[in-house]
């Protein structure tokens, strides 16, 4: 079965979702990521969704779950690259991304993770909705 | 109302849900929808399709491009012969971020559509129809 | 009722073309359907109409003008309608283009088949039905183009009234003027998010000085816009909170969960601080002895 690649950059994990995932793939990503956070003792997780043209409640819940799980493992989650049409739709859908910080792109995302890990942005306790 | 294009696809597995997103996108593009409107109807379709698979035991989706006077739109009809929804009103309330319960996708799909209709008979099945006008 | 005989119209148009054209143009002019400056266009349109009419009637049926054989006539009428709608003609003036053909046509028919009363009656009746249908078609087309123009103007107005300005690197401002309804909110969100992508802005100042009232709905729309911007990695600051608005917000129990300031200036100052910038006075050079 296909897998979504997870890259390690320093003490961060980077996932770039390039395909329109079916549910099983999304679930296995969740599991893989959690396992890898533990294995690498990552402090930050960056999920690049710039290629996703649709984020529905299932994917939204997956992102929330990943954020919640990394929080428990003392890692920060940042979602980057959300497409404007997707953001507008998510807002209309009424799905709140809790515990998930967002940034415009990978560069800003890495900078944000850095600030979160180093405790500048009020640490991981500040919730974003 | 004039129906210009008409297609039916199966909605039985999570792979079909992916296919539904693709087909609905194609219809929306064909109807001249803006990118945001395309995304909204595709997302709404994804929600209902998943419901059809997870709770309806699988079913079908009928895609139509419709025209009413000057307006053009896309109509989607999801039908299944599953257990049905006993309390439709409850299913349409916002149980969203709590992450539990039946038919969560329906209230979201309703918000993303211009028109929303649901008919469900316990023991017989459910039909959900949404229309998004350009 | 299907036409039971072949219409004389094709032959008529062939034989009497100049006379029909002249008579028709005279009719149009006297009914005020066109002015001197339109002369060239009207003449060419009328000539072409007669040619297309001849083709259509020669094909045998004049019941259904939506059929293929009438495509030429329909296209011409579309052209005439569109041109006149743009020029500001009324629907009646545009339809008169077709209706004013009746008199010269009936005159020509009388000349041609006047001796056979029954034949004349049938031909006139058939011609009337046909021209009525075509005239009404013209009116419909006219209204359709006018609706399209209005729709386009409405869209342009909506676009223009929701500008997004870049105040500084990383800082955008969205001055909202007028009520914030759902249609407006959609445009605001689209414009704002597009600008965020293009400028990489991290702060968006939403100024509501120009928003007359803030009720629950407006607050919801504001919240949506703020959430959307946040999903794109930009924080929002609301400015232009008038005392009454502040009261209303508290009264409604709305939690915008975002910093708000009374003036855009305050908001801008805060935004600059957040992106790590400070404003300093320029050092004045002491005047040298020569100055």
Image (tube, coloured by chain):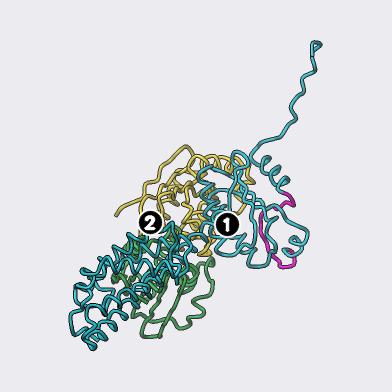
C70 or B125: which is nearer to us? C70
In the rendered image, residues at marks 2 and 1 fall on the same chain: no
* Quarter of the image with the C terminus of chain C in it: top right
Image chain in cyan = C
Circle 2 residue: A28
The chain that hosts pointer 2 is A
Image chain in yellow = A
Position of C273 relative to C159 (above/below): above
Magenta stretch: give its range: C250-263
Q: Residue at x 70, y 35 (%)?
A: C278
Label 1: element kind = helix
Residue furthest to the bottom in view is C118
Q: Position of residue C97 (x, y in %)?
A: 38, 69
Q: Position of residue B75 (x, y in %)?
A: 38, 72
Label 2: element kind = helix
Do residues under tags 2 and 1 come within 8 Å of each other at their CB atoms? Answer: no
Residue furthest to the right in view is C289
Image quarter of residue C178 = bottom right
Question: In this structure image, what is the colour of chain B?
Answer: green
Circle 1 residue: C227
A78 lies left or right of C133: right
Q: Position of residue C6 (x, y in %)?
A: 18, 80
Q: Is C255 inside the magenta-drawn segment?
A: yes
A124 lies left or right of C144: right
Q: Is C262 inside the magenta-drawn segment?
A: yes
The chain that hosts pointer 1 is C
B90 or B110: which is nearer to us? B110
């Amino acid at each position: 079965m296909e897998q979504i690649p997870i890259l390690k950059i320093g003490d961060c994990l980077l996932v770039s979702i390039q395909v329109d995932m079916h549910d099983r793939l999304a679930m296995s990503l969740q599991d893989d990521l959690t396992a890898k956070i533990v294995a690498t003792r990552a402090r930050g997780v960056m999920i690049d969704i710039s290629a996703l043209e649709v984020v529905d409640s299932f994917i939204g819940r997956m992102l929330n779950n990943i954020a919640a799980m990394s929080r428990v493992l003392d890692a920060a989650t940042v979602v980057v690259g959300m497409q404007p049409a997707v953001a507008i739709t998510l807002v209309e859908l009424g799905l709140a991304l809790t515990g998930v910080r967002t940034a415009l792109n990978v560069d800003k995302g890495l900078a944000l993770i850095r600030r979160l890990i180093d405790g500048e942005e009020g640490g991981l306790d500040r919730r974003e909705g | 109302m004039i129906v210009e294009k008409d297609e039916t696809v199966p909605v039985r597995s999570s792979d079909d849900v992916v296919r539904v997103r693709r087909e609905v996108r194609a219809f929306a593009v064909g109807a001249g929808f803006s990118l945001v409107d395309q995304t909204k109807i595709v997302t709404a379709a994804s929600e209902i399709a998943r419901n059809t698979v997870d709770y309806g035991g699988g079913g079908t989706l009928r895609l139509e491009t419709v025209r009413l006077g000057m307006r053009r739109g896309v109509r989607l009809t999801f039908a299944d012969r599953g257990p049905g929804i006993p309390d439709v009103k409850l299913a349409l309330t916002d149980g969203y971020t709590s992450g539990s319960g039946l038919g969560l996708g329906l209230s979201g799909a309703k918000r993303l559509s211009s028109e929303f209709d649901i008919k469900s008979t316990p023991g017989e099945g459910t039909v959900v129809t949404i229309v998004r006008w350009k | 009722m299907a036409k039971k005989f072949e219409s004389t119209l094709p032959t008529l148009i062939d034989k009497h073309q100049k006379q029909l054209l002249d008579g028709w143009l005279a009719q149009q002019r006297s009914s005020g359907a066109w002015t001197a400056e339109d002369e060239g266009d009207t003449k060419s349109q009328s000539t072409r109409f007669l040619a297309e009419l001849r083709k259509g009637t020669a094909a045998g049926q004049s019941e259904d003008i939506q059929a293929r054989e009438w495509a030429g006539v329909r296209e011409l009428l579309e052209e005439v309608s569109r041109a006149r709608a743009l020029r500001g003609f009324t629907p009646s003036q545009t339809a008169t283009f077709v209706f004013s053909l009746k008199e010269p046509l009936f005159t020509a028919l009388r000349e041609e088949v006047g001796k056979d009363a029954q034949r004349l009656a049938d031909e006139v009746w058939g011609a009337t039905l046909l021209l009525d249908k075509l005239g009404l078609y013209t009116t419909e087309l006219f209204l359709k183009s006018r609706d399209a123009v209005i729709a386009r103007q409405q869209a342009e107005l909506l676009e223009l009234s929701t500008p997004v300005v870049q105040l500084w690197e990383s800082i955008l401002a969205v001055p909202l003027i007028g009520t914030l309804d759902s249609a407006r909110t959609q445009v605001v969100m689209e414009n704002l998010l597009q600008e965020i992508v293009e400028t990489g802005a991290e702060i968006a100042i939403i100024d509501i000085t120009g928003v007359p009232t803030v009720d629950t709905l407006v607050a919801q729309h504001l919240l949506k816009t703020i959430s959307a911007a946040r999903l794109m990695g930009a924080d929002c600051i609301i400015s232009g909170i008038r005392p009454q608005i502040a009261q209303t917000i508290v009264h409604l129990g709305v939690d915008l969960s975002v910093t708000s300031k009374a003036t855009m200036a305050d908001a801008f100052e805060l935004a600059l601080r957040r992106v790590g910038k400070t404003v300093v006075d320029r050092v004045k050079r002491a005047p040298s002895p020569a100055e």
